[in-house]
Image (tube, coloured by chain):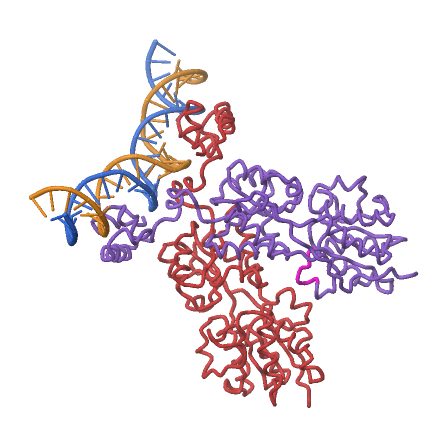
Chain colours: A purple, B red, C blue, D orange
DNA sequence: ATCCCCCTCTGTATCGATTCAGAACTGTAT
DNA sequence: ATACAGTTCTGAATCGATACAGAGGGGGAT
């Protein structure tokens, strides 16, 4: 059994309070006694005040939870998520707060338990899907949180939120593509519908897409093309199972054999766009006219690949989310942040080739 | 004030134990009563058992700490560290354990406190430097841990360890470079000496290098060149402040103006190697004979850059570290794992150009 | 009818600290 | 000598739950 505070107190012959003060409030006792206590503690192998007991008594933990509404191990493979995390960690670091990464198993019941069992003072929620259970679970626990879910952000509720205007940004990059003359285009999203296999999809309207981010970006793309006379049914929608390069490549490859392949592919993320480029770089497409590709997020690889994309401040998003949580602004309106985005035109887009 | 277990017990008219059982051990009470308790709890807004109190009583937390012996926010910018983390998180996920990322401020006193205050059941320590304070602090707390520090690993102590044979792997890639005929080479390491500015360094012997990983890799490089008759003093050692591309580029650029530039640069990490390539791709080097470059780790960018490097299983390293911590093997020898590495030859290395 | 067992539920001790009002002591001014 | 102010330390209450032995009641076997 490890010695406790009490054991040290007994060994020194003082009260428990005094030993506690020796650690947490040096000004409450004489330096000599404090030293004697610390020495004795070391001598009997006291590991220092138990953090859990301290948290219980003090009423706070000194850690914030980071909740990815997907597998945690996936998060580390997503460059955008990693940059978000880097931002969160920078803010936490400055604040001296730890970060608790909460793992999620598949079943949502377990996921709720994971939220309920997390010893944290609040949550940063990185929303990948349309799940509200996570927010509900946090709210039920009465913990403060900040979210990145565009739908909730747009809801303008009292929910603290850091995001971008997904739809407007998407419209912007799509307008660029439209201005280059593209009219036969494919839109590529991650898990456009929950269980659809990678490939083309027929959707009555964009509003059936459950994931808020995917929905908003697709809707933005559609907005821009609607303005140049291309209606929703004339757009090809591709889904990739999971935000992965191979899945995106597969989805795009399936399109290339068709009689009238698109002249441009607009992806909902850079990772998907890179997958599209992979497909276009393959032998299947060799000799055919080039197809323009756009991404979203501007991850590091995008520049090297010459990808035209939408830049959003990823670290900033994480940093602000954590700061909103760690020192909440007095003004509730300040808890609702929309960050600017920027269209970055590189070499992956060009005018429609005349055939 | 949030309602407690006791409040629910009072509201339902049962004992505290019964309410506790309703949450943690459904088999200990009738389904009907359990439902009534859960309903009442929801009605009065009880947030569920307090995780901190539960941990205190149960004696474990359900989280493991991940300690980077450097700024946490740096860790997310290092591709190798991210892959390590991905591995740790995969294991944690499977085990239903959370990950506590402990932030470190500059001062080592604060850093110790950070370790002392972390509410965790054990630590995975990702060692970047030669710091032993972290291990000492963890040991003083009496917590189990697993480390990646090669020096400790090599020490063959009872410390649990997952790593690679740094020196042998480094010797392998250096032998490849030597076999290509290179004799005038530069070795590039991250923070070879703590406070040296980026650029060349004169070291009496490799053993003055404090960081274990950097030391072992440089020593491995030197081993290979010693075999072909190039002694330590004939090797140029370059240091880059921090494992960053620009710092590496700066260090290498400083060498290009010299009368006898090296024909090869062997870097201690892919990030540094990419920096070296940046410098060589710049206008300063245009028109000059190519310089071979090697990296270490085989991060994702390495393949795209055609970098010859040493592949090591990064996720695997993290995964095994976490598993060693989460289910300790009965056999103590099994707690000491050396993973295989592989030389990956790409286009960044070639024979010495005849001038 | 008696005994025994099982199923539910309760009471109390306990996890390991922090907090805060106040006791004891010391020294200084009146 | 008395009062008063500081400093240093103590005691008891408290944070919010879990564990475990055991009480009480109902039903089946004998």
The quadrant holding residue B105 is bottom left
Relative to the observer, which residue lies in front, A251 or B46? B46
User: Is residue D4 found left or right of A181 in the rendered image?
Assistant: left
Relative to the observer, which residue lies in front, B302 or B254? B254
Would you place residue A136 above or below residue C27 in this image?
A: above
Q: Position of residue B323 (x, y in %)?
A: 50, 54
Q: Position of residue A184 (x, y in %)?
A: 86, 52
Query: In percent of the image, x 52 and y 84: which residue is there?
Result: B226
Q: Position of residue D5 (x, y in %)?
A: 22, 47
Quadrant placement of the C terminus of chain A: bottom right
Tell me, yes or no, if residue B334 can be seen here. no
The quadrant holding residue A305 is bottom right
In the rendered image, residue A298 lying in the magenta stretch gets the answer yes
Relative to the observer, which residue lies in front, B154 or A246? A246
In the rendered image, residue A133 lying in the magenta stretch gets the answer no
Would you place residue A71 above or below residue B269 in this image?
A: above
Tell me, yes or no, if residue A42 can be seen here. yes
Q: How many marks?
A: 0
In the rendered image, the residue lying farthest to the right is A355
Q: Which residues are magenta?
A: A297-302
Relative to the observer, which residue lies in front, A188 or B44? B44
Query: In percent of the image, x 25 and y 48: which residue is there?
Result: A9
Q: Position of residue C27 (x, y in %)?
A: 15, 54
Would you place residue B283 above or below residue A320 in this image?
A: below
Query: In percent of the image, x 64 and y 43: which residue is there?
Result: A153
């Amino acid at each position: 059994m490890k010695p406790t505070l009490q054991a040290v107190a007994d060994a020194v012959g003082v009260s428990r309070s005094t030993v506690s003060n020796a650690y947490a409030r040096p000004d409450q006792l004489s330096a000599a006694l404090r030293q004697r206590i610390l020495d004795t503690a070391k001598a009997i192998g006291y590991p220092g005040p138990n953090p859990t007991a301290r948290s219980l008594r003090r009423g706070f933990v000194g850690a914030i939870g980071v909740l990815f509404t997907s597998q945690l191990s996936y998060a580390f493979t997503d460059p955008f998520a990693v940059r978000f995390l880097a931002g969160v960690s920078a803010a936490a670091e400055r604040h001296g707060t730890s970060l608790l990464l909460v793992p999620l198993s598949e079943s949502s019941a377990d996921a709720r338990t994971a939220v309920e069992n997390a010893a944290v003072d609040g949550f940063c929620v990185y929303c990948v899907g349309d799940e509200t259970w996570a927010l509900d679970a946090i709210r039920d626990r009465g913990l403060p949180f900040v979210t990145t879910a565009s739908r909730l952000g747009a809801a303008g509720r009292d929910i603290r939120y850091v995001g971008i205007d997904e739809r407007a940004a998407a419209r912007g990059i799509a307008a660029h593509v439209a201005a280059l003359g593209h009219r036969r285009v494919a839109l590529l999203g991650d898990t456009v519908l929950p269980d659809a296999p990678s490939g083309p999809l027929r959707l009555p309207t964009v509003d059936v897409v459950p994931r808020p981010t995917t929905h908003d970006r697709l809707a933005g793309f559609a907005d821009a093309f609607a303005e140049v006379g291309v209606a929703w049914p004339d757009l090809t929608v591709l889904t990739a199972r999971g935000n992965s390069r191979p899945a995106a490549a597969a989805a795009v490859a399936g399109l290339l054999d068709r009689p009238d392949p698109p002249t441009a592919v607009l992806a909902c993320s850079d990772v998907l766009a890179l997958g599209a480029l992979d497909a276009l770089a393959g032998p299947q497409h060799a000799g055919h006219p080039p197809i323009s590709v756009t991404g979203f997020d501007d991850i590091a690889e995008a520049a090297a690949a010459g990808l035209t994309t939408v830049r959003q401040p990823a670290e900033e998003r994480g940093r602000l989310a954590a700061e909103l949580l760690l020192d909440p602004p007095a003004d509730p309106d300040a808890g609702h942040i929309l960050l600017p985005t920027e269209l970055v035109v590189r070499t992956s887009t060009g005018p429609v080739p005349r055939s």
